[in-house]
Image: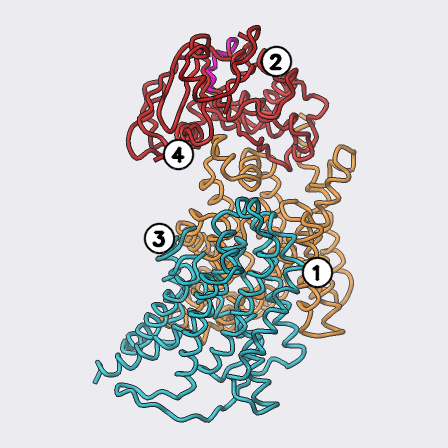
Chain colours: A orange, B cyan, C red
Amino acid sequence: MSDRIAKYYPLIPVYSVYLALFLIGKNVPGMWQLIAMLAFYSAIGQAFNIFLGMTGYVDFGYVAFMGVGTYGMALSISHLYHVEWLGVWVVLIGFLLAAVMSTILSILVGAVALRLRGAYFAIATIGVNEGFRYLIEGARIWGGSEGIIFYGQLAQAVGRKTASILSTFWADIFVFVIAGVAAFITLFYMKGKIGYALTALREDEDAAKVMGIHVTKYKIIAFITSASLAGLIGASAWGLKVTNVFPPEVFEIHYTIECIIIVLLGGAGTLLGPVVGGLIYGLSKYWLTVIIPGFQLLIFAPIILIVIIAFPEGVIGVLARRYRGTPLGKFIA
Amino acid sequence: MIGEQLAGNLIQGLFLGGIYGVATMGLSLIFGVLNIVNVGHGAFMMVGAFIALLMFNTFGLNPIYAIPVAFVVGIALGYLFYYTSIRKLIKAPELASLLATFAIGILLEELVKLIFGSEFRGYHWIVERVDLGVTVLPMSKVYALTGSILVAILLYVWFKKTRAGMAVRSVVEDDVGAGVCGVNVGWVYGMSFALGISLTVVSGILLTMFIPVGINPYMGGTYTLKAFVVAVLGGLGSPYGAFFGGLIFGLLENGCYTLFAMIPGLEPFAMTRFFSFVMLLVILLIKPTGLMGTK
Amino acid sequence: MAINEVYLEIDAGERIGIVGPNGSGKTTLFNLISGVFFPEQGSIYFEGKDITRMPPYKRAPMGIGRTFQIPRPFGSATVRENVAVGAMFGTLGSQVGVREALEIADRYVELVGLQEHRNKPAGGLTPIEKKLTEVARSLAMHPKLLLMDEAMAGMHPKDIDNMVDFLKRIAEQESISIVAMVEHIMRAVVGLVQRVVVLHQGSKLVDAPTRDALKDPRVVEVYLGHPPEEHAC
């Protein structure tokens, strides 16, 4: 019995961090935007980690799911705002639509790409974000290259005051919630059969198959989970918060790069890793923006190289190994 | 009228395709020998483009002179990155080299941005125009295609006739066996990587002969995707396949653009980009080994 | 063509050795049985079912297990976790949750004598410990047929004897058929298997009980090596 609960100990540090962030943001004036950014980075880090960290496959087009999720929110609000009885439910529908759309995209991409091995998979995904962006612009769907601006429509649906609170406060809170959910799912996978299967296929895909593991099935599960969480994050942090969406902005490879940095720095395949990575990256970026605006990648690119070559397990990976078997180790995963 | 326009577009496509082909030969070479996918491919082309830009704007030298410079710079960069990072990742899981080459690409982009800024630049090389009947081309494009074909032929000769080239081929076939036969496999890896990189940088020059504008630190991204389509078309480990894949892709791309332009309600430039991506997925689905690939 | 017309039949609980020099087709045969690739012609039946084109991950829950020539345990997982993977996805797969799998794993880890290492990552073990981990992992699958690739390659003679005794015992206890593949007829195979199949250039040369196979002049000719010591038979 206590064993069953002890399984979930690693969530304690994660949730403590989130709680601490929230309290700091709420109570220290002027910190909210920074906190929101840190939460955002931890959230996408966790979501991305469920696929990259657990399967060892890299999806270079990952931001596409965030972009699609943003469109989900945008489409819901911009099309349903005039339905009076819906009111604030347009936001909920926005989230649902975001999750559904990103899931569908992940199934479409996965159906082709997940049958492929490592490098071919990466190649297949490299154009997904761009491809989708150009589809929207080229076929002029969903507002084409002009995008969708929907603050006014949100205000009409829920009233000016609510709209303002939603986009300046609740949007960020939802990101915290999604991050928390992502953390739980991560641990749930890690400790369950899925986790064993994913570790096996990550280490040695052929041996895993021979052991009876249906590798494609597990890859798909991880992929869809990761994608739908990204969609929800996009819907909230980009859609609800910014209340507009433009194809070149929400499909930028830049965000995938940030996901990769966050997960790798913190520790791919660990639970706490993306949280730590998100904090490190977010704070560094914030600080670097003051000193050398626009050039944080110049610093991080060589850091990533060094991590890959010398510390592939990342911060938490190293810590987890060092404290394995000790009481502290029960909280680090 | 439409037929003429189509033919003209197709010829343009063929010319551009030759450049895509050379650009991808480096990618295929590196994959064929080291089993590493250079995700930062486009960034190296960008470096070549900037070399052409610099040499023209600073020294007034036309891009043909930039080619040997690009070759040397490419070799230097190739060896630099090989010895600092790539060498240690040959035996590592695939993920490591994918992310490392990706990071190298980003590093190059940011360095160039730091030095030159992110504005779009270009140069204006005044050349005569050649009338091919269905279309008129500036000589620069003719030079570009000639350059591409020359590079392809040179590489072919190098592989078949020189000792170094044969050493490389033996490593592609069987790296353990080659080692046992006395081939210095590490040296082959380093050289192949450097050569692959320099081919890519040179292709950046050839690209600017075709499109001398829009040069900026982030221009590489599009070409990385195109290079992958071409590489997969031609077979990921085969440099010759890459060349022919390039020609085919150039044709398809241009043909696509013309067709999309004729359909109202569609924006042809964006749709062509979307189509390239779809092409990649289709090839990967049907025949991932490509036309001439062995892997 | 790597294999040409090999006909092979294995009974439940039988232990056979597949022997042959490099290029004789042993590895291909193994890969065909475990599902790494499919034959162009011919078929493979397991317990009456046609598994010729079945993907490898489906063969494992049916009861086909396999170890590799160079042991490939999952490096970042502990010994215990490695063995648990076998239990989770083998023949008992659907009835076994993570906790039960770990309990089963503990049993097999003890059986192969790796208890002290059970919580160490498999990547840091010595080659023989890795081999034992693999064996335990395959056994935890509760296989009906165990394919052992170069079963005792590179092992110390004393360890070989121990392994042979262990495998014989387990095979009889749990009614597992073993197919051990080796390059030469060694003391190991001789002690372990009841029947020897010799492959030569993709075809079956000899298929006979161990004693008889060893005396067969064709076998000696193929090998040009010295026959094993008398007392090993």
Amino acid, disc 2: Asp
Q: Secondary structure at mark 1?
A: helix
Dot 2 or dot 4, earlier in sequence: 4
Disc number at residue C161? 2
B47 or A93, which is in the foreground?
A: B47
Q: CA distance from mark 1 to mark 4?
A: 41 Å
Instruction: Give how far across and how far down residue A241 sits, in percent.
Output: 58, 66
Q: Secondary structure at mark 4?
A: loop
A33 or A196, which is in the foreground?
A: A196
**Other residues around mark 4 within 10 Å, as few (<14) / some (14–19) / many (≥20):** some
Q: CA distance from mark 2 to mark 4?
A: 34 Å
Q: Does the rendering let one see residue A228? A: no
Which region shows up in magenta?
Answer: C172-179
Q: Is residue A189 left or right of residue A144?
A: right
* Front of the two marks 3 and 2: 2
Q: Secondary structure at mark 2?
A: helix
Q: Determine contact: label 1, label 4, CB under 8 Å.
A: no
- Which residue occupies 21% across, 80% down? B3
| Marks 1, 2 in one chain | no
Amino acid, disc 3: Lys
Q: What residue would you read off at disc 3?
A: B287
The image quarter in which residue A238 lies? bottom right
Q: Chain of mark 4?
A: C
Q: Is residue B236 above or below residue B154?
A: above
Q: Determine contact: label 3, label 2, CB under 8 Å.
A: no
Q: What residue would you read off at disc 4?
A: C55
